[in-house]
Amino acid sequence: TVFDSLNSPVSWMRKIYIDKKNNVFLTSSKGVVKYDGNDWTIIDTSNTKLPSNKVSGVFVDSKERLWIGTYDGNIRMDSDNIVEYNNSESPLKEGAITDMYEDKKGNLWFDLYNNDDKSKGGMFVLRTNGKWESLKPKKSDLFTKNDINDFLLDEDKNELWIALNSVGLIKYDIGNDKWETYTTENSKVPSIHVMQLTKDGDGTIWGATFAGLIKLKAE
């Protein structure tokens, strides 16, 4: 089935996200388009408190709250209200949500983007107790100079993999608080541009790069 601007609201979409109910969310510079298998819904500045139609990311958590990131701020759409973060005392005031993940304990992991001041972007965790935690290596300026393209939390090994633009791969051993950087110079990572990470059912992690695929075998 082909969906285009003639038979749907689809027009120059950037990202595709599918929630646990198989709702499909498409992000664009004109807001978010939702497709439930039958009907299309448009979420934009005309019908919500979305700060901008230039959407950077979208996510639905286990409480069925819809998080939407834009380059001018972030919102969370609950069943009966909308939470705005532009004036909040949280990292969401400083960076646009580009990717999110909810772990088995209910902690929410965020990749936040800030083009003007990269030191305010990066990886953050919102714990179930409501406290925020910034994740970055000590005595390193990698995260203050480079954007995150994607991240993957391997809960089986308690490791966080980060695709850092113009660098390669970063591995964070959470239990031992140990950071490792893999580049084209010290590893078999074929490109400094790793764009997407995913894990298959066998525990193998795959990375898409500008120069081919990375396959990290489970040990």
Image (cartoon, helix red, strand yellow):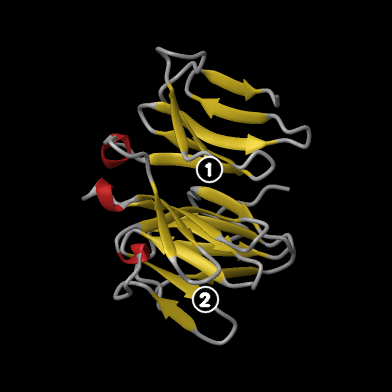
Q: Position of residue 130 (x, y in %)?
A: 48, 71
Cα gap from disc 2 to disc 1, whole angstroms? 31 Å
Write the residue at 29% across / 61% down: 94
Position of residue 144 measured from the top left corner of the image (x, y, whole percent)? 27, 41
Looking at the image, which is closer to me, 28 or 148?
148
Give the secondary structure at mark 1.
loop
Badge 1: few (under 14), some or many (20 or more) residues near its Cα, within 10 Å? Answer: some
Q: Nearer the viewer, residue 154 or 86?
A: 154
> Which residue is label 2 attached to?
77
Q: Is there any visible trace of residue 29 in the rendered image?
A: no
Q: Amino acid at mark 2?
A: Met
Q: Amino acid at mark 1?
A: Ile
The image's mark for residue 174 is: 1
At horizontal 68% and vertical 57% (from top left) the residue drawn is: 104
Give the side of residue 187 with respect to residue 198, left or right. Answer: left
SS of the residue at dot 2? strand
Which badge, 2 or 1, is on the more N-terminal residue? 2
Write the residue at 63% across / 37% down: 198
Residue 152 drawn above or below residue 46: above
Quarter holding residue 164? top left
Q: Is residue 26 left or right of residue 37?
A: left
Residue nearer the viewer, 143 or 46: 143
Which quadrant: the C terminus? top right
Vertical arrangement, residue 192 with respect to residue 39, above or below: above
